[in-house]
Amino acid sequence: MIISFFDFDGTITTKDTLWQIIRYQKGSFAMYTGVLRLLPALVAFKLKRIPAQEMKERVLTHFFANMKEEAFRRGCEDFCAIALPKLLREKALATIQQHQQNGSKVVVVTASPRYWVEPWCRKMGIQCIGSEMEVANEMITGRLLGINCNGEEKVKRIRQEFKLESYRVIYAYGDSAGDLPMLALAGDKASFKPFRG
């Protein structure tokens, strides 16, 4: 058996979809206004004074806290159908389709919440492993459930889902330091920033 793991943001897509889902659901004006309000935290994050999970939760909380989960979900599904196709790398799509034709199981492993990745994955016949968002009283809180699915957490989540020893070949594709532990699973079948240009 063969299995292929793909990072999503920056690997399959040309842009970070966190900001794209904000723009799609809230509009450009609200996005830029929010960026200004979050600027001190964003600067601190760039300087590595705020961890990635805390920064992501601050952003999600600012834009989506107290939004009805059903409305958020619908907006994410619409985003996948309407806006996401314009952000996809053709070389990445071709590679995914080639793996599927060769009988490989294809899995997206992303730090992005599954809300706006899984609908696209479902359409493509791909399994999705991603960060989980907390919902309380049918409302988005902005917090994550558990650990941000990045770095070593990607490997942990993969191993929870799959017995890797059962696969004779493992492929992995990524574009950032947060993908390196996942890429290490694939050995010489790992590809770093393979779809650029």
Image (tube, rainbow, N blue to C red):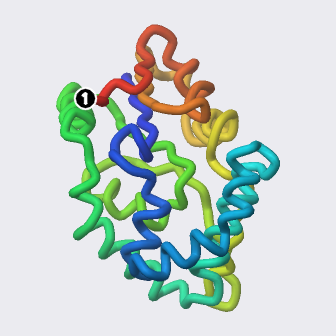
Quadrant where the C terminus lies?
top left
In x, y percent, where is residue 43?
70, 54
- Image-based side of 186 in relation to 139, left or right: left
Residue 4 visible (yes or no): yes
Residue at x-position 40% and y-position 80%: 27
Question: Looking at this view, is 25 or 164 the one in front?
Answer: 25
Image-based side of 58 in relation to 8, left or right: right
Residue appearing at x 30%, y 30% in the figure: 196
Q: State the residue in front, 156 or 57.
A: 57
Tell me residue 95's x, y (percent): 24, 30
Q: Residue under circle 1?
A: 197
Q: How far across and how far down the image is residue 149, in percent?
A: 63, 47
Give the residue displayed 40% in from the left and 26% down from the top. 193
Residue 138 position in % (x across, y down)? 61, 89
Which quarter of the figure has residue 58?
bottom right
Q: Nearer the viewer, residue 127 or 88?
A: 88
Query: In the picture, which quadrant includes the N terminus?
Result: top left
- In this rendering, the answer to whether 17 lies above or below 62 is above
Dot 1, how many residues are within 10 Å of its Cα: few (below 14), some (14-19), or many (20+)? few
